[in-house]
Image: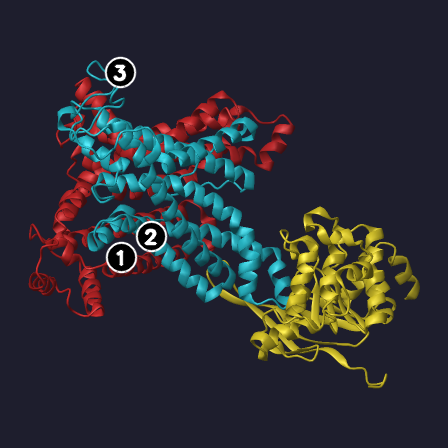
Chain colours: A red, B cyan, C yellow
Amino acid sequence: MKFARFVLRKVLAGLVTLFLAATLAFFIAKLSGDPTIQMLGLSATPEQVAELKSQLGFDRPIFVQYFDFIGDAARGDLGTSLFSGDKNLDTLFSRVWASMQLAVLAVALGALIGIPVGVFAASREGRLGDRVASVLSIVGQSVPVFWLGLILVLVFSLNFGWLPAGFKGDWRNLVLPVVTLATIPIARIARLTRSAMTNALEDQYITASRARGLTSRRVLFAHGLRNASLPVVTLIGLQIGTLLSGAITVETVFAWPGIGSLATQAVTNRDIPLVQALVVFGAVAFVIINTCVDLLYGVLDPRVREAS
Amino acid sequence: MFTTEVTATPAMRKSRMWNIFLIGAGLFLLAVALLAPILPLQDPGVQDLERALRPPVFSSRGSWDNILGTDPLGRDYLSRLVFGTRLTVIIALSAVLLGALFGSLLGVIAGFKGSKVDAVISRITEAQLALPFILLGISVIVARGQSTSTLILVLALVGWAQYVRIIRAETLSLKERGFISSLRIGGLSDMRIIFRHVIPNVFGTILTLGALEIGTMILAESALSFLGLGVVEPDISWGAEMARGKDYLQMSWWLATFPGIAISLTVLYVNLAGDALRSRYDLRKRMF
Amino acid sequence: MTDAEQSIVLQVNHLTVTHVVRQNGGRRRPLHAVDDVSLDVRAREIVGLVGESGSGKTTLSLAACGIGKVSAGTILAGGHDFSSLKGVARRRAHADVQMVFQDPLSSLDLRQRVGDGLDELRSIHPERTKRFTNEELMTRVGLTSDILGRLPTQISGGQAQRVSITRGMMLQPKLLVADEPTSGLDATVQAQILELFESFRRQENLAILFVSHNLAVVRRLCDRAYVMKEGRVVESGSTRDLFERPQHDYTKRLIEAVPGKSAKLAGSR
């Protein structure tokens, strides 16, 4: 019963956040300016602007627009694209799988490489191995990820011709975008693993055991990994969310038919409803993933269920 | 979007030489940005179609006239990159200032007042953090139209939430210490306590966070410019140059490569400097 | 005002302070940090408030100073009912009831020099602080004036505590609430601080509510004392009566726990 209450609390909190986020997004966009002028260009006449406005429903009072927006969104209607005429939700769903592929694979690669690197750095704390890992991590966080993608394309695709540059084909098309995207989670996961493990190793209980000569390296690592596993697992979950919406530039570089390149298209076309739908969708994905991660945390660590 | 967090190694951190290097590099960067117009460079806006797409000097067809080659319109690339520093610096600094001001103030108020005010502010901050950054930026820019000021606004909008959480936590731990109660008993008004006592005490954190955020802002601005949402011609941004370079990747590789190097080096510097600041103010290491 | 009719400086009537605590299992239970407590302090008295941590004495102190939460009951401190005051009037009223905290360093702004802190208080209470200059204030508590230019991190614990006391006393309060002011200080410094309290009581017409778990100190300094346990007052009386003829079990246990006292207790039974 306790757990059911915990789940309910988390889901409710997620819904509230989602509602607030959608509201925030709506008002930020509305208060930023009048997009109809942008859409028609500077040569538009006032009549054309007025017509477009009424066509889009932008001439209604703002709260009416808001309630319509929220009402529609709650029922799953995220509007219609101005350019394709398709329902936005359908368009999004048709492309989300491609983005998910990248996100999940990138995070998986991130964990696969990041965790061992983090463990390694923790074990060599302060020494050369740790320093090298730190430097790499710093450099990794300074490089714009889309530039890295371009360089990889340049080297591996155009230069050596080993791998194709983009488009969705077989598994070989996945390699470059996934590797590019993976640099973000690799760096984060490695750093988190390292700090979680060093924290664990500094644990008083461990120091005391060590002082009595009781602890073997294996036990030390087991303890460190146990301590690190929870935050690392939650980070992995969160990363999927971040990458899902953060992959826009990478998808653009690799012409990957996911949500990201959809966003770029929407921008080029000044397709306001689609952009708005994308923002809401991104928020939904984020909140769902965060809530799942919170719930997972609650399953794994009973203390969390009591607190908050 | 997470703050860029960086851990330099202990040895690097403590070295005096290192600090001198950091300060020097920073001054150099600022100097380049400020003095660009008077440096002995070619005009980055002058087009010369005959010299279009010349490779850099170390390539076989390159020449010393254009050390880093030219772009599709024949403009000297080295000078374009140098001039690109200006907007990068201005935009990043402005966005950080705006975001830090707004976010920190909210964080202090939330931590200080507690209960309902805190609940409202925290909820809104969480909601803001749920919104995907680039998409939010897109929706604002599409509504307002592209301009440098819009860009700064968008970046500040995306960044302010980071400050709230951290500064709120700092404020709460200040409250724990009890000197705020002591000041209240002394008869100080809340306003006075906030501005004369809380803010000076959290200022170090704000500064450090801001320094680290500069790197994030630079990356964010270059991403937006890369997507065609950033600065407008004739202003120069490294991200925008990369966007153009993307289409010429096969034959004119330098167009996409050099701006990225510039961004990476600048952000690298900012991250290292920010980390040096952080260790100076001795913040506890945060896992996230 | 006659001696017989000493004015009451602190009147606490049926005070209850409740916190809502979420227990294991999600149930919310109200926790009474202070449970129906009544006490008073008269001018020129030093009254002790004794109890272990968690007894509610700090919560009571904060409420008495007008900055703590009050769920039920009334407090009249220095003649003011803080719950009904707002704004400037409230802030002025604070001057009549001052507090000295346990850890001096955590109650001072570490970034503010001692002298600047005093000046700040002057700017808020100009009339009340006219009496002494900063240098004189330092001398009054046994400090030298070079302390004025220092940061709290540059002075010792005992000096910091004296600065805290100065900040309180310079506003000429009617009541000083001292919450464990001497724990963490070494014995000689403790003695000096207690001496300071005594001299203030004599010279300044000051009443002191002395909160402590240290019975030896309470015995030495206080005229009367209240014993608190889990939010309630279990016993009260003159310190002599409390120590020589404790009624309540808890009081007896507290006294027995003081090293060197058990012999005396055994003898008086």
Q: Mark 3 lies on which chain?
A: B
Marks 1/2: CA–CA distance = 11 Å
Side of C122 relative to A174 (left or right):
right
Distance between mark 3 and mark 1 Cα atoms = 49 Å
- The spot of residue C216 in percent (x, y) is 83, 59
Q: What element carries label 1?
A: helix
Q: Which quadrant, please, contains the C terminus of chain A?
A: bottom left
Q: Mark 2 lies on which chain?
A: B
Q: Residue at x 26, y 51 (%)?
A: B136
Viewer can see residue C184:
no
| Towards the viewer: C35 or A108 | A108
Residue C255 placement: quadrant: bottom right
Image mark for residue B157: 2
Position of residue A307 measured from the top left corner of the image (x, y, whole percent): 47, 55
Which amino acid, mark 3? Phe
**A267 horizontally vs A9: left or right:** left
**What kind of residue is marked 1?**
Ala
Residue B60 lies, in percent from the top left, at 21, 13
Check if mark 1 and mark 2 are on a common chain: no
Image spot of residue A94 (x, y percent): 13, 45
**Residue A184 in view, yes or no:** yes
From the image, tell me which residue sits under label 1.
A25
- Subunit that carries the residue with mark 1: A
Name the image quarter holding residue A142: top left
The numbered disc on residue B58 is: 3
Crowd class of label 2 (few under 14; some 14 to 19; many from 20; radius 10 Å) = many
